[in-house]
Image (cartoon, rainbow, N blue to C red):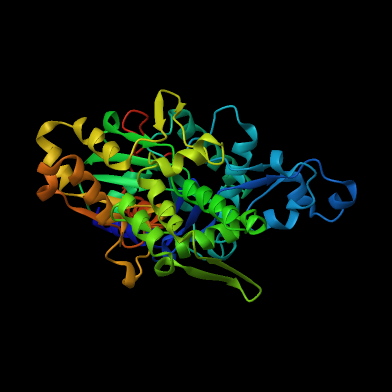
């Protein structure tokens, strides 16, 4: 028996493969990549409405699939007559609608593209018999998403002559983070590009206590874009690449939003900053440097009056949405969302949850300049301050930490889970664990 287990472990040490279906980015790759998976945007371009002259230049296999992802999107985007209709972001809120055929086509192409980066080389190895694949999806995903993801992997495996995949399993993204952090009882706050999942965990997600927010990194991008317009860079505000760079370089999380705004308005030169995008493009923010704090604050609490004018004018959209039977709250502040979630778990483990609150996701990854440490804070300290202000009595119990690599923690935990999950455990629709195989 031990020989079989050893053989299984040796195989999975080479051929465990994970996919993190993030709202903004798709992270993928085998265990052999170590700490850093491959990354592309969670988007795809449907190749329709193409001029006949352009079709002649596109490889037949790509034209047949009718969708491209990764760098190919930029390559063909200008050739599409209706780019807005054909550029799809299927995972904006982490959930792909059952009837959205275009979105599922993009998901399938993301999966196929990921495997294509590794299969040719791995398939030449004499011991390769297919990957053990772990797909990480939103904790809020309905059952039909799991069924469809299994179905798509089967279809892609058939495209590779059934030599690509041994079996597939699916894991909730926050649970993958908990596994990566070796935390059995905890709360994972996973802030991606499109939404934020607040998930208490005790040997598995406590689903009835999950709280979801309809905001994440995308809202920080949105307010950055409007700030660029307000300070005279309307043309650059149209470029998502520029917006992302500016957000990361100038965004600040305030220790206290109102106080930070007051100080910055009184001393704008202290917060003035230049950002060099490339040798030809540079932006500078001077008198409006107080707006830097809006970029960081919007993820934590968008209810301040400074945001309301943008919302009322329709320049940014922050609102509640209902997906299935789940409400994704727009303006609920992050501390209130965490407290609401904790109140829904059994009383006897509430203290244990408070002792291990884990922040994950790129939307929590912010820099605090040394010279501004008296006014700006990191995500961990911001959460501690906000919760302590609302419930002072639990301040001494709070233990909040940010994972070492927020963007890749889900992928890392998925790899660990796939390696550890015995291959003889079959998928169960009831427990939502185990390996699903069609062979």
Q: Quadrant of residue 425?
A: top left
Quarter location, residue 210: top left
Above or below for 44 versus 406 = above
Q: Is residue 19 left or right of residue 357?
A: right
In the rendered image, residue 348, in percent from the top left (x then y), is placed at 9, 34
The location of residue 41, given as percent across then percent down, is 56, 53
List the single residue furthest toward the front.
266
Residue extending farthest to the top is 325
Asked if residue 214 shows in the view, the reply is: yes
Q: Report the residue at 29% width, 66% height from top.
A: 373
Q: In the picture provided, is 378 more to the left or to the right than 154?
A: left
Which residue is located at x 50 percent, y 37 percent?
311
**Of the pair 194 and 120, the residue shown nearer to us:** 194
- What is the x, y in percent for residue 204? 26, 39
| Residue in front for this viewpoint, 98 or 258 | 258
Q: Is residue 62 left or right of residue 304?
A: right
How many numbered marks, from 0 up?
0
Q: Is residue 427 left or right of residue 53?
A: left
Q: Position of residue 247 (x, y in %)?
A: 49, 59
- From the viewer's side, name the closer residue of 407 and 146: 407
Asked whether residue 181 appears in the rendered view, the answer is no
Q: Residue furthest right?
A: 53
Judge whether 158 appears above or below 347 on screen. below
- Please report the residue visible at 32 percent of the width from the left and 72 percent of the height from the top: 370
């Amino acid at each position: 028996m031990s020989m079989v287990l050893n053989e299984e472990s040796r195989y999975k040490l080479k051929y465990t493969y994970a996919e993190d279906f993030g709202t903004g980015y798709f992270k993928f790759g085998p265990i052999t990549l170590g700490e850093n998976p491959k990354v592309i945007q969670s988007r795809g371009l449907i190749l329709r409405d193409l001029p006949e002259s352009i079709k002649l230049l596109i490889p037949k296999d790509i034209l047949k699939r009718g969708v491209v992802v990764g760098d190919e999107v930029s390559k063909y985007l200008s050739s599409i007559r209706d780019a807005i209709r054909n550029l799809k972001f299927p995972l904006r809120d982490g959930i792909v609608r059952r009837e959205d055929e275009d979105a599922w086509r993009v998901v399938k192409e993301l999966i196929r593209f990921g495997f294509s980066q590794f299969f040719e080389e791995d398939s030449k190895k004499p011991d390769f018999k297919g990957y053990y694949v772990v797909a990480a999806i939103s904790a809020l995903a309905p059952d039909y998403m799991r069924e469809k993801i299994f179905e798509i992997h089967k279809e892609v495996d058939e495209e590779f002559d059934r030599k690509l995949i041994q079996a597939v399993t699916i894991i909730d993204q926050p649970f993958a983070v908990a596994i990566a952090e070796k935390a059995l009882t905890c709360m994972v706050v996973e802030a991606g590009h499109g939404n934020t999942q607040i998930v208490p965990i005790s040997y598995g997600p406590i689903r009835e206590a999950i709280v979801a927010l309809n905001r994440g990194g995308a809202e920080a991008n949105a307010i950055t874009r409007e700030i660029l317009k307000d300070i005279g860079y309307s043309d650059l505000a149209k470029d998502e690449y520029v917006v992302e760079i500016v957000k990361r370089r100038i965004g600040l999380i305030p220790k206290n939003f109102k106080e930070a705004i007051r100080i910055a308005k009184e001393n704008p030169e202290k917060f003035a900053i230049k950002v060099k995008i490339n040798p030809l493009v540079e932006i500078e923010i001077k008198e409006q440097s107080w707006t830097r704090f809006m970029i960081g604050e919007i993820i934590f609490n968008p209810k301040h009056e400074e945001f309301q004018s943008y919302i009322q004018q329709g320049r940014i959209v922050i609102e509640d949405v209902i997906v299935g039977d789940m409400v994704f709250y727009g303006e609920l502040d992050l501390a209130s969302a965490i407290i609401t979630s904790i109140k829904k778990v059994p009383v006897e483990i509430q203290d244990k949850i408070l002792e291990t609150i884990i922040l994950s996701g790129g939307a929590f990854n912010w820099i605090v300049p040394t010279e501004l440490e008296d006014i700006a804070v990191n995500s961990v300290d911001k959460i501690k301050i906000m919760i302590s202000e609302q419930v002072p009595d639990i301040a001494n119990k709070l233990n909040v930490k940010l994972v070492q690599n927020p963007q890749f923690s889900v992928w890392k935990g998925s790899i660990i889970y796939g390696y550890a999950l015995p291959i003889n455990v079959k998928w169960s629709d009831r427990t939502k664990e185990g390996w699903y195989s069609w062979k």
